[in-house]
Image: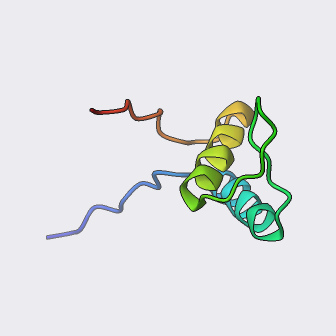
Amino acid sequence: MVKKAKKRRYSKGAAKKVGRAMKKRKAGTLKSGRSGKKVKSRKQAIAIGLSEARKKGTKVPKNRSKKN
């Protein structure tokens, strides 16, 4: 039986955007959108990178809805 190749969930461009956001966070220069506060959270940095990738039009899954 032949295994089916898995599709990439995120594009390489999206990975670059997230990597750039993570580097900026480590350097202390990543800022959030409206308030302009420094981003300290790893999850927030990833979210910012993915958001930028979506705006650029790269292959990124849709936002997950928040669950209570």
Tell me: 48 left or right of 34: left
- Which quadrant of the view contains residue 35? top right
**Which quarter shows the C terminus?**
top left
Tell me: 12 left or right of 56: left
Q: Residue 31, how many percent across, how many down?
A: 79, 47
Is the residue 18 above or below the residue 34 in the image? below
- Which quadrant of the view contains residue 53? top right
Q: Residue 45, how many percent across, how many down?
A: 65, 54
Q: Could one spot residue 42 in this view of the protein?
A: yes
In terms of depth relative to the viewer, which is nearer, 10 or 34?
34
Tell me: 60 left or right of 45: left
Q: Residue 60, how many percent across, how many down?
A: 54, 42
Going 40% across and 35% down the picture, which residue do you hit?
Answer: 64
Is the residue 53 above or below the residue 11 in the image? above
Is the residue 55 above or below the residue 18 in the image? above
- Which quadrant of the view contains residue 48? top right
Going 76% across and 29% down the picture, which residue do you hit?
Answer: 34
Is the residue 33 above or below the residue 48 in the image? above
Going 80% across and 62% down the picture, which residue do you hit?
Answer: 24
Q: Could one spot residue 11 in this view of the protein?
A: no
**Which quarter shows the N terminus?**
bottom left
In terms of depth relative to the viewer, which is nearer, 39 or 23?
39
Going 47% across and 55% down the picture, which residue do you hit?
Answer: 8
In terms of depth relative to the viewer, which is nearer, 9 or 49?
49
In terms of depth relative to the viewer, which is nearer, 9 or 46?
46
